[in-house]
Image (tube, rainbow, N blue to C red):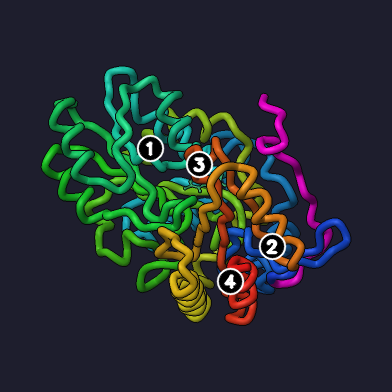
Amino acid sequence: MKNEAAFVRTLKPISSKRSVLVNIGGKEYIDFSSNDYLGLSQHPEMIEAAVNAAKKYGTGSGGSRLLSGDSELFHELEDSVARFKGKGSSLVFNSGYQANIGIISSLLSKEDTVFFDKLCHASIVDGVMLSGARFHRFRHNDAGHLEELLKKEKARKPLIITESVFSMDGDIASLKDLVSVKNKYSATLMADEAHATGIFGKNGAGVVEELGLSDEIELIMGTFSKSLGSCGAYIACSEKVKQYLVNACRSFIYSTALPPSVVACNLKSIELVKKEPQRRKKLLELSAYFIGLLKKNGIDTPSRSQIVPVIAGENPAAISLSDKLKANGFWSLPIRYPTVPKGEARVRFSLNSGHTEEMINKIVECLGT
Ligand SMILES: Cc1ncc(COP(=O)(O)O)c(C=O)c1O
């Protein structure tokens, strides 16, 4: 492990939380690093759902879904996810990381070939590595490069993987282009909607919904851990794929199921996303305001979403930018190499429907000085 200061990772415990205000080390900050984009983790109906489920079923699930960890709540949740995402079926996982490594490694073997975007999340990369499949990384958001690779490789039934909203750049995949390429090469497409779910689309189901592509994209993965304010993940897919995963996916089979309180929250979160569209509307308005203000001040960002990175350069530059923001009361953390490419260390601002334009004005002021 590298131990130079610019690489060391440390834990920073939060002692209390109130909307977007967090207390860390005895000081209050405005949190610009949380993925709880809609503030649902503090929604009274979420808390009530968790408490009621714990009272009814207890605090732990007691085992894997295939032993005694299953409950009716999981089946209700999987029906709800399938409807929300416009797919025939769905399967719930304990986390997005477990979902990606498990799904990818069980669907692929050494005989298969997979193509994924260069900026895909570590959980996708790890799933591919675990599968042992041949892989190619296409240039970020470049369907033309993907097609070149597919043409050269001539793989049988290839899998293509992308995120829909990219977790580090906040830009959005050209899903329509990827769908036409995948159709041309009889491939399967998997979209990770971890950062899009709850925010994009008429019902908040994600970018796939917004673009009307749920019938075209075979595997739609997403998490409950970000704008849904909880924990866990899912794949929305056909019933056939679900049954295959129940029988073959090691991260599903060999892990204790989520506790009932979390499953109840996950169910409630989908209901709230549909019922309270004003949260995602405000979030997207604030995001556009922030991006516009940065541009006006000559600060570039690739963002087209609620994730707004400001690239600082090498790791020490991102650390000192984050420290400056911290001194001004903003909790906005540096994302460094090797999490992002070398020379592209950044402060990644995660907007929240609880933020205000005044908070954003102050941040931009701080970035400009
Ligand atoms: C694109 C993407 N996929 C998957 C994950 C993993 O999700 P989880 O945090 O629920 O394990 C993340 C979160 O870090 C992510 O950004």
Q: Is residue 316 above or below residue 283?
A: above
User: Can residue 301 be seen in this snapshot?
Assistant: yes
Q: Earlier in the sequence, mark 3 or mark 4?
A: 3
| Residue 257 image position (x, y, % from top left) | 61, 41
> In terms of secondary structure, what is the magenta stretch mainly?
loop
Identify the mark nearer the N-term, 1 or 2.
Answer: 1
Residue at numbered disc 3: 343
Of marks 4 and 2, which one's residue comes earlier in the chain? 2
Q: Residue furthest front?
A: 369
> Disc 4, ligand 1: is the CB inside 8 Å?
no
**Residue picked out by circle 4:** 364
Q: Residue 69 colored magenta?
A: no
- The residue located at (49%, 75%) in the rendering is 293
Whichever of labels 1 and 4 marks the residue nearer the N terminus, that label is: 1
Q: Amino acid at mark 4?
A: Val
- Split into 4 quadrants, where in the image is the C terminus? bottom right
The dot on residue 1 is none
Q: Which portion, as a residue range, is magenta?
A: 1-19
Q: Residue 266, can we see it?
A: no
User: In 3D space, how far apart are the residues under numbered discs 1 and 3 (Cα atoms)?
Assistant: 44 Å
Query: For residue 242, which quarter of the picture?
Result: top left
Q: CA distance from mark 3 to mark 4?
A: 22 Å
Viewer-proximal residue among 319 and 24: 319
Query: In the image, which disc is placed on residue 243?
Result: 1
Checking the image for residue 325, the label placed there is 2
Residue positioned 53% across, 72% down in the render = 272
Three-letter code for the amino acid on which mark 1 is drawn = Gln
